[in-house]
Image (cartoon, rainbow, N blue to C red):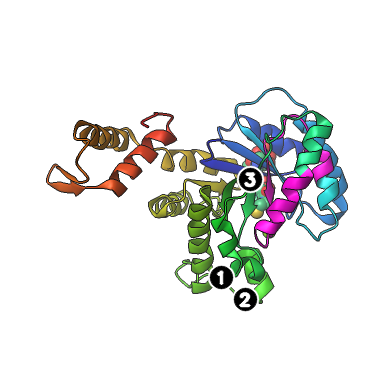
């Protein structure tokens, strides 16, 4: 599953779903959680269930369910685990025990609805509760079905009673920088994709591009979108440029030509194993097999 851009669509808006379908996002996340008001939860669940039966698509169909403990989780899962669903985004996870639990439920529902066992992947919002922030060590043992982790500052701030999560210049305050970094480390340990959190100011294209650049620099491979206008910028940023790819091919070829070299020089710069890994990763991200 390639996940550069993941566009959130409120689960109770057919208008937005129709608008989002052809926009070029790698995934749509139909939301049953925070974007849907309590009186519309049941309606949204039914709408998303019906949309899953639609025609074949070239993007991943993901659903954000309501969190464990909300008393909506089982009904959400029972409605959406069916043919057409590619993955579930679990909000407010406290650690891998929650992933295991959901995974077990999905095991049964896949069999019941005729979905290929193991097809439905799991993604988590890994930093939304204080308990999650002290439970990251559990990710060192990879969880089955888990393919990606993202992070969020709003719910964590609310749980902590923070007055704000931003400095005056718009950067994250320290606790949320920790959350962001922990998400990166945990995703690395679990060997899954790290996805950056959303950029709320959807009219600020320049700010979005800069936040994508910083995220990609640090190791995130994709980013959540909340508005169709954000998708193209995100896709572009998380796709290696032709120059990046040409350079990566050169690095791979140089090491292939000297199988006994652990380190070598290209254009007057030292290259060793981390550079080779990065080059192979860039090529793999566009489907070039270099193993
Ligand atoms: N998916 C699909 N279509 C969307 C969309 C989305 N996420 N966000 C906006 N649109 C549509 C609007 O319906 C509108 O369509 P129209 O021109 O046919 O009426 C068009 O894009 C332009 O929207 P705009 O007027 O710029 O924004 P808005 O004020 O209508 O909506 C939000 C702003 C934030 C409410 C909206 O972007 C949204 O719902 N985002 C997703 C929120 C969400 O799911 N949050 C949960 C995770 S945090
Ligand atoms: Mg939330």
Q: Position of residue 214 (x, y in %)?
A: 40, 55
Do labels 1 and 2 touch, CB within 8 Å?
yes
Return the residue at label 2: 162
Return the residue at label 3: 144
In which quarter of the view is residue 110 placed?
top right
Return the residue at label 1: 165
Which residue sits at x=53%, y=72%?
175
Number of residues whose C-alpha sits closer than 10 Å to that of mark 2, classed few (under 14), some (14–19) or many (20 or more): few
Magenta residue span: 77-105
Vertical side of 269 occupied by 113: above or below: above
Which tag is nearer the camera, tag 2 or tag 3? 3
Residue 87 shown in magenta: yes
Q: Is mark 3 within 8 Å of ligand 2?
A: no
In which quarter of the view is residue 154 placed?
bottom right
Do labels 1 and 3 touch, CB within 8 Å?
no
Quick one: SS at disc 1?
loop
């Amino acid at each position: 599953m390639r996940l550069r851009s993941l566009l959130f669509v409120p689960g109770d808006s057919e208008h937005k779903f129709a608008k989002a379908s052809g926009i070029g996002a790698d995934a749509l996340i139909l939301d049953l959680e925070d974007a849907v008001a309590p009186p519309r939860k049941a309606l949204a669940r039914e709408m998303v269930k019906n949309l899953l039966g639609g025609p074949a698509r070239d993007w991943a169909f993901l659903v954000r369910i309501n969190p464990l403990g909300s008393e909506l989780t089982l009904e959400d899962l029972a409605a959406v685990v069916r043919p057409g669903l590619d993955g579930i985004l679990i909000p407010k996870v406290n650690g891998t025990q929650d992933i295991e639990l959901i995974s077990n439920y999905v095991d049964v529902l896949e069999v019941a609805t005729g979905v290929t066992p193991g097809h439905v992947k799991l993604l988590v919002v890994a930093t939304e509760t204080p308990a999650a922030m002290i439970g990251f060590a559990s990710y060192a043992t990879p969880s089955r079905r888990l393919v990606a982790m993202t992070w969020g500052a709003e719910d964590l701030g609310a749980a902590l009673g923070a007055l704000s999560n931003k400095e005056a210049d718009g950067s994250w305050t320290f606790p949320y920088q920790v959350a962001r970094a922990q998400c990166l480390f945990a995703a690395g340990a679990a060997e899954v994709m790290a996805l950056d959190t959303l950029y709320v100011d959807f009219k600020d294209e320049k700010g979005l591009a800069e936040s994508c650049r910083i995220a990609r620099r640090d190791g995130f491979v994709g980013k959540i979108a909340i508005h169709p206008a954000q998708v193209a910028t995100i896709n572009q940023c998380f796709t290696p440029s032709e120059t990046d790819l040409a350079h990566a091919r050169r690095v791979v070829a140089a090491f292939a030509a000297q199988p006994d070299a652990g380190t070598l020089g290209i254009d007057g710069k030292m290259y060793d194993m981390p550079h080779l890994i990065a080059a192979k990763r860039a090529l793999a991200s566009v489907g070039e097999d270099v193993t």
